[in-house]
Amino acid sequence: MAMLPRIVQSTAFGLVPAIKRPIAVAKRIRSFATVAGNTPRVQPTPSRIRSTPISYDRATFTIRDGPVFNGKSFGAKSNISGEAVFTTSLVGYPESLTDPSYRGQILVFTQPLIGNYGIPSAARDENGLLRYFESPNLQAAGVVVADVAEQYSHWTAVKSLGEWCAEEGVPAVSGVDTRAIVTYLREQGSSLARITIGEEYDADQDEAFVDPEQINLVSKVSTKAPFHVSSSSGDTHVAVIDCGVKENILRSLVGRGSSVTCFPYDYPIHKVAHHFDGVFISNGPGDPTHCQDTVYHLRKLMESSPVPIMGICLGHQLLALAAGARTIKLKYGNRAHNIPALDCTTGRCHITSQNHGYAVDASTLPSEWKEFFVNLNDSSNEGIVHKSRPIFGTQFHPEARGGPLDSSYLFDTYLESVARFKQGQAVFQPNRDSRPSPLLVDLLAKERVGVVPTTGMENLLRMNEAGEQASAAARAA
């Protein structure tokens, strides 16, 4: 609570004892802080303890209580378990595979050929954000394709899809009938599955399937301490609740003139929101009901602050839960770049990019809320909006790096409300300054803190159990 009220102060007095965790991180990076300017975002050298040489062994993709598909490995020699889901996106596989929303999932591509334009470098833009990826690491637990291009051609490419998967420790399978896989998943729904490299399928291994819904995946992809990204073209300051935020969401905010400070998903944002011009809730993986602390903090925020709020994907679902609505799990979800969503306020249809397995039950919305968007394929909810306050959420991704950009104007709508709120606050508090302190900007991390790269669901489950045991021991002490 004592940490963020001082983020926006212009003096350095009292800052050091107020922010212990970020400064601890900063001290490991450099010995002295300077107020001369914002330090550039530097990507740390990733740990390759999970890396393996590319495996071209026999590979088996097994759906629990379902069919078994034999193919060929082209990624890491690693056996994993996860939830099998499919995407119909034709392009954008580097962005999809680095999307934290895919954590714990085995991604099946319906596009017959994947990898033909390779994998780009980890180059960063003028704001220090990754140009071609949505996070620093490959997030999916496994990759399944009909055919992989071992030879690639593109001016941004530096390696093949197989090389990248092997470096990231992620198994990948080609040579399987993805049409049959998708047909099964559409009929039976998203299912647990395994990828086994170099071994024959054993029915007794069915007990090894691990359900990612048992795990709070958001806690695995959210930053463990605040980090900051500055904008040089505006003076607004937005607090982002990081549930697994995509780089292009940050770029969409910063590029429109708003500096952002990102907080862990369970940070009590309602205690510091009055120091910001807006609050944004990001996308993320898994079941939204795991994030009860986030829901509670959002509920308290809406009760205590008039600040504008926007949520995307999981952030939209958490906003709905905080408002009093319920969420449901879809049979096989929506994952594509070409899904039509109807704007209920204008009657216009937008082609949208989506990646979600849960949705808001619009029939449970309180009276002060209404539907904003509706999916024209399955009639599921795609957005909600408050009837009298600048608060809304969308299930789809208006920032979609792989396109389309039909709904990117929603960021303009949100930041216009942020600017109006900032101007309104200036009337009542003439000396209010929400801009971050240059000193604190220099001290805060410039990217996610303490996020562990993806791993098999068995390892995630063990990590989750270890974390719970450690928390219980700390409470007992």
Image (cartoon, rainbow, N blue to C red):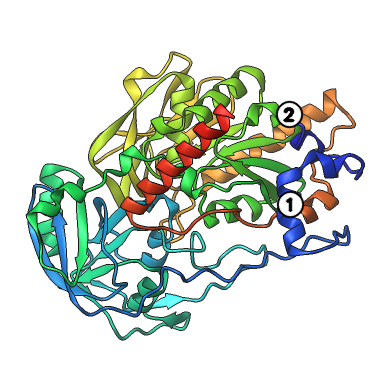
What residue does disc 2 label?
274
User: Which amino acid type is shown beneath numbered disc 1?
Assistant: Ala
Q: Residue at x 57, y 33 (%)?
A: 474
Q: On the image, which quarter does residue 430 sit in? A: top right
SS of the residue under disc 2: helix
Q: In the rendered view, would you say 78 is above or below 265?
A: below
Residue furthest toward the front?
477
The total number of labels drawn is 2
Indicate the quadrant where residue 78 lies.
bottom left
Q: In this view, does 352 lie above or below 477?
A: below
Q: Which residue is drawn at 85% across and 42% down?
A: 15
How far is the residue under mark 2 from the one under mark 1?
Answer: 26 Å
Q: Earlier in the sequence, mark 2 or mark 1?
A: 1
Task: Assess whether mark 1 and mark 2 are in contact (beta carbons under 8 angstroms).
Answer: no
Q: Residue 422 appears at what percent x and percent y?
A: 75, 34
The answer to whether any part of residue 444 appears in the image is no
Which residue lies under the disc numbered 1?
Answer: 24
376 relative to 269 in the view: left or right: left
- In this view, the residue in front, 158 or 258, is 158
Amino acid residing under circle 2: His
Please name the residue shown 76% across and 50% down the image: 23
Instruction: Left or right? Give the position of 164 relative to 408.
Output: left
